[in-house]
Amino acid sequence: MKNVRIKISLFVNYFVFAILLNSVGIVILKSLENYGVDEVQASSLEWFKDIPIAIVSFIIASFLPRIGYKKAMLTGLLLVMFACVFMYFGNSFWTAKILFASVGISFALIKISVYSVIGLVTNTTKEHNSLMSSIEGFFMIGIALAYFLFPAFNSNDNPDAWLRVYWLLAGLAFLSFLLLYFTNFDEGSEIPGVNLLDDVKQMAMLCTKMLILIFICSAFLFVMVEQGIMTWLPTFYKRVLQLPPNVSIMMASIFALSLAIGRIGAGIISKYISWFYILSFCIVIAMLMVIFILPKTIETEVGVINSITDIPLIGYAFPIVGIFIAPIYPLLNSSILSALPKKMHSPMTGLIVVFSALGGTSGSTIIGWLFKNYGAESAFYYTLIPMTLLLISILILYRLTNQSIYAIN
């Protein structure tokens, strides 16, 4: 029962940050409309979100056990609560930058804590795979909710009406804070905290292992693809299919829901099938969808669109690519973390978060540049490059794991 309460708390905290962290695509669209910035400037919101994630993760990852996972998560929740209120009153592109910087700092604390606590409340690799995929799947449900939550506050008569959503988000962060505050759990007293010099040494030591290097490359490439598509999908639908902003945002929710389905499904399938075969199949299908489904979506002729139900069926097809790229991230992460001693989970998670943040920023920035210089119709085709590299890196990773190169001393 104790572990159940802990798991519920982890799910709720991750859910709140799913809405906040991945609303960047929506805020980019709003920034283009309301704040007079271009695509490249708007894509800088990804930098303000992801660079703080990378920096904070690198600095605090290894000695977070000494600080305390619970204290770290409570701090993150309070910070984003105040940032949401500030966004409402600030109502500017600079305020949006501050908001996402705060979200990035907080998410680093939350993600490292959540991943580390997963290792404390699970005992086997299968349990770890299942809980990791389930939490990441629930994260995607939160993302999908954001694509309906923000449009619900939009108003054709008031361009600033959407900002009222931040009062609701501040309230959710506060409720999550209270739930976590009253949840007690063992934070792994057998795992000692270390000093900053040891932190750097541990992370540097991990980076010298070929297995870890290939894994880091794989995580970087995946997040580059996922964030590139997720961030710019609302703008893609608005510009290519000429959909109203609200409908464009809601259409992007299909991608998030597909990611949720894929990750939750991966938690079940991975109990019976090797992660390598799952991921290889998924990447190949995703590439085929970009090659064959994306052009049909671009060529779709639409009439007057007043709601999401007016869109032709082919318009829904491309976001379903999320089902096939979804299993990659949690299965890669779980395969590494479950193979390491629990004392190494914080530094390893730090590396995961750092390179995931860099991958997400790179993907969003590159797609934004392609949107501006080559048009929305062509930008997503370039995801085939990181997908191909990802397939190669997963093959190398599988061979390394088959050779049992797991020794991390």
Image (cartoon, grey):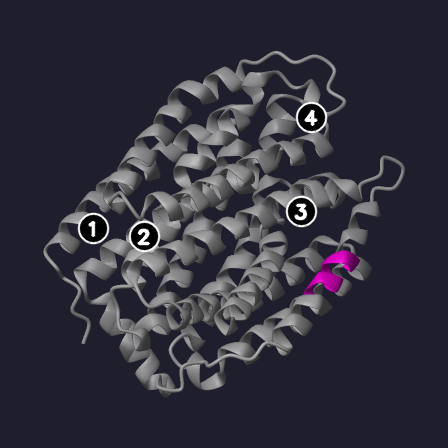
Magenta residues span 167-173
Q: Earlier in the sequence, mark 4 or mark 1?
A: 4
Q: In 3D space, how far apart are the residues under numbered discs 4 and 3 (Cα atoms)?
A: 20 Å
Q: Tell me whether circle 2 and circle 3 mark residues in contact (CB < 8 Å).
A: no
Residue 277 in the image: above or below residue 111: above
Task: Kindly report which numbered mark, 4 or 3, lies closer to the viewer in this rendering.
Answer: 4
* Residue at the spot of label 3: 27
Q: Residue at x 49, y 82 (%)?
A: 68
The CA span between labels 1 and 2 is 10 Å
Percent position of residue 70, x then y: 54, 78
Q: Residues within 10 Å of mark 1 (few under 14, many from 20)?
A: many
Q: Which residue has dot 1 on it?
A: 397
Position of 260 with respect to 149 (left or right) is left
Kind of residue at disc 2: Leu
Q: Is residue 180 left or right of residue 380?
A: right
Q: Amino acid at mark 4?
A: Ile
Instruction: Look at 63% across and 77% down and name the residue there.
Output: 181
SS for callout 4:
helix
Q: Which residue is mark 2?
A: 332
**Quadrant placement of the C terminus:** bottom left
Q: Is residue 395 magenta?
A: no
Left of 13 or right of it: where is 280?
Answer: left
Location of mark 4 (residue): 308
Residue drawn at 80 percent across, 41 percent down: 154
Nearest the eye: 287 or 258: 258
> Would you say the residues marked 1 and 2 are in contact, meaning their CB atoms lie under 8 Å apart?
yes
